[in-house]
Image (cartoon, grey):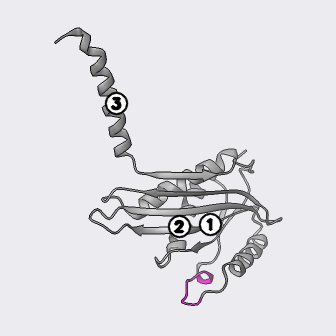
Amino acid sequence: MNIAHIPRLRSLLTLCLGCCAVLLSACSTLEHGAAPQLERQATWAVLPFANHTETPLAGQRAESIAEALLRARSQAQVRRYPAASTQEALFEASEQKLQDDALIWARQQGARYALTGAVDEWRYKVGVDGEPAAGVTLQIIDVQSGETLWSGAGGKSGWSREALSAVARQLIRDLLNDALSGLR
């Protein structure tokens, strides 16, 4: 083998490894604001997530994932809005009314911050591979003022052998990690 070809082989190998890394990673996009300064020991409330999909109970599934990740990441006391109040029905009450009621509940619980959001995609894509895809928006709200302190949105798709819940968990985890990076 000619020694002059070694730099070219290294370049080719680097290019191939880079392409493999891109192909092996799932596609995701995240958009979010700067992380606010949040009190580490504050009490949190997880409020209802709106379901803008055709998948029944997708909002509640995202809430459960977000609650578990929030508990693990913040190590704070976390309360969740009672599930019986958020059951999806054929003719739902307005999302804004439900959110207002949930914020009142959070104030009564003594929560400092509230986590809420919406699910915009929660499905397996139609096709041969049936890749899982999730789209979520999250908001952190100051419970007393009602002011939105942080918001972020993201979408993620996985490979055909991945569970939709795993893809959604990765997406929500990435968003929450960005949001909670300002914990003090």
Say what secondary structure mark 2 lies in: helix
Q: Quadrant of the N terminus?
A: top left
Question: Residue at left 34%, top 38%?
Answer: 19
Classify mark 3: residues with Cα within 10 Å, few (<14), some (14-19) or many (20+).
few
Is 168 drawn above or below residue 90 in the view shown?
A: above
Q: Nearer the viewer, mark 1 or mark 3?
A: 3
Magenta span has 148? no
Image x and y of residue 172, in percent: 54, 57
Question: Going by the image, does 92 lie left or right of 106?
Answer: left
Q: Report the residue marked by disc 3.
A: 15
Residues packed near mark 1 inside 10 Å, few (<14), some (14 to 19) or many (20 plus):
many
Q: Which residue is mark 1?
A: 117
- Which amino acid, by three-letter code, is at mark 1? Gly
- Give the x, y percent position of residue 43: 72, 60
The span from disc 1 to disc 3 (Cα, nearest Å) is 39 Å
Spatial CA span between label 2 and label 3: 38 Å
Q: Amino acid at mark 3?
A: Leu
The mark closer to the camera, 2 or 3, is 3
**Occupied quadrant, residue 97:** bottom right
Of residue 126 and residue 92, the one placed in the foreground of this image is: 126
**Depth check, front residue: 101 or 97:** 97
> Which of marks 3 and 2 precedes in the sequence?
3
Please check the rendered image and state whether residue 86 is part of the magenta-colored stretch, yes or no: yes
Separation of disc 1 and disc 2 at Cα?
A: 9 Å
Taking 128 as reference, is 78 left or right? right
Count of numbered marks: 3
Rendered image: mark on residue 52: none
Q: Which mark is residue 62?
A: 2
Image quadrant holding the C terminus, namely: top right
Q: Which residues are magenta?
A: 84-91
Please tell me which residue is depicted at 47% across the width and 60% down the height of the picture: 168
Measuring from the top left, give residue 112's x and y in whole percent: 76, 61
